[in-house]
Image (cartoon, rainbow, N blue to C red):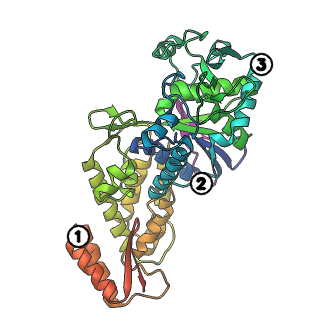
Amino acid sequence: MLDLYLYNTLSRKKEIFQPINKNQVGLYTCGPTVYNFAHIGNLRTYLFEDFLKRVLEYNKYKVKHIMNITDVGHLTGDMDMGEDKMEKGAQREGKSAWQIAELYTEAFKEDIRLLNILEPSGYHKVTDNIPEQIALISKLEKKGYTYKTSDGIYFDTAKIKNYNKLSHLPLETLKEGARVEKNPEKKNPTDFALWKFSPIGAKRQMEWSSPWGVGFPGWHIECSAISLKYLGKNLDIHCGGADHINIHHTNEIAQSEAATGKTFFNYWLHGAFLNIVGGKKMAKSEDGFLTLKKALIDKGLNPLAYRFADCQVHYRKPMEYSEDNLRQAEQGLDKLWEQVATLGSVKGKIDLDLQEKFVKAVNDDLNIPKALAVLASIFKAKISSADKLATVLDFDKIFGFDLKNSVNYIKGEVSSSALPVKIQELAAARLKARLNKDWKESDKLRDDIKAAGYSIEDTAAGQKIKKN
């Protein structure tokens, strides 16, 4: 296997990946704040992290993947001011903050399933790890890194060397950014809350007792506490969106390294934004932000078309959203499934020359677009259909298009027995109708199949058929 190179935000260059423990990788990915649906910009980040995890596993690493679920109320301003997101969501929908958290956690998991993203080794709710966060803040307090204001316990960033080592921005620039929302009690503009006090005379839905008073954790402390608890000595890779570099991840590093005296993750990987055509970043603060349902499902598009579209843009490059782009991606995915379906069901051997080109691409900082080109070249290669199928399915361990089911794209019998020729012909005709967007003919053929005693189901991988 070739060396795996990853672009490390800390060093601003590609580095050969070397885990702390041989053949094992600790991977932490920042999870959703569950006060609303994830939009497709959020989901682009989870897709890039999924490709990373799949590449690591393809390289024979055993990956322990931890993701937090931010189900506790945090303030919408990056500098610990503004409205509480969970309380805001509860008011918007007439539910409790706890109900909102549960509702959108399940919605997020469904999005993950529809995009065929591998689930983490563990989802860990912030509300299940409050004691760990309090313990970490207490440790920082004992070491002299904290101070108290009227609204909470703050981290003193002036006591940290190289506070800006992840952002690589002049400290003055970070300070200017912090002044968007002023707190006159802060010692330094970049200082951030570790623990916030509940407002006097008000009862929050989510609040806890602590050594400093009743309140709730600051935004950044959760990821430090959860990753240190569940990954321990395997702090290899930390991921997230590019918008987390300057504040959230910078503050995670500061508080974690202050508390432990050790390096907090060796590799930091960040995905670029999904922009609406014209270059504007997609954000939940904007009205009408696009969810997977709105952008694809409601328009009759396969959710995996978004995965296919994402494969065409490197994770560190901005990606532009348009409905036309997604429709073209769906056509490309349909063509791929059709091509794989023609290879039959007998697997041969993986073509080693093609595999070497493929590995060289994915191990070069997850160059999935280049790997996609290698995948396309398989169908023109002068090798047997059986070897083509084996090679395609091997590559799909990373792409995640569920191509193993494409051998059933027409012959979708769940049982091992062969489908009757008549049913095969009807299924093939229906497939052709669907590819031509002839929905009326497609529905008629579905009824003909049903009348013959078989049921047909459209799945992400194509048609699946079984005898009633």
Residue located beneath label 2 in the image: 57
- Circle 3 SS class: loop
For image coordinates 39% across by 63% down, the residue present is 378
What residue type is disc 2 on? Glu
For image coordinates 27% across by 54% down, the residue present is 327
The answer to whether residue 81 is left or right of residue 225 is left
Label at residue 439: 1
The answer to whether residue 206 is left or right of residue 441 is right
- Residue 153, horizontal then vertical, whole percent: 66, 20
Could you tell me which quadrant the C terminus lies in?
bottom left
Whichever of callouts 3 and 2 sits on the residue coming sooner in the sequence is: 2
C-alpha span from label 1 to label 2:
40 Å
The answer to whether residue 344 is left or right of residue 449 is right
Of all residues, the one furthest to the front in this rendering is 201
Q: Is residue 97 above or below residue 458?
A: above
Whether residue 370 is visible, yes or no, is yes
Between 416 and 202, the one nearer to me in the picture: 202
For image coordinates 44% across by 37% down, the residue present is 316
- Residue 306, horizontal then vertical, whole percent: 37, 52
Between 360 and 243, the one nearer to me in the picture: 243
**Residue mark closest to the camera, 3 vs 2:** 3
Which image quadrant for residue 321? Answer: top left
Q: What stretch is highlighted in magenta?
A: 1-17
**Residue mark closest to the camera, 1 vs 2:** 1
Label at residue 143: 3
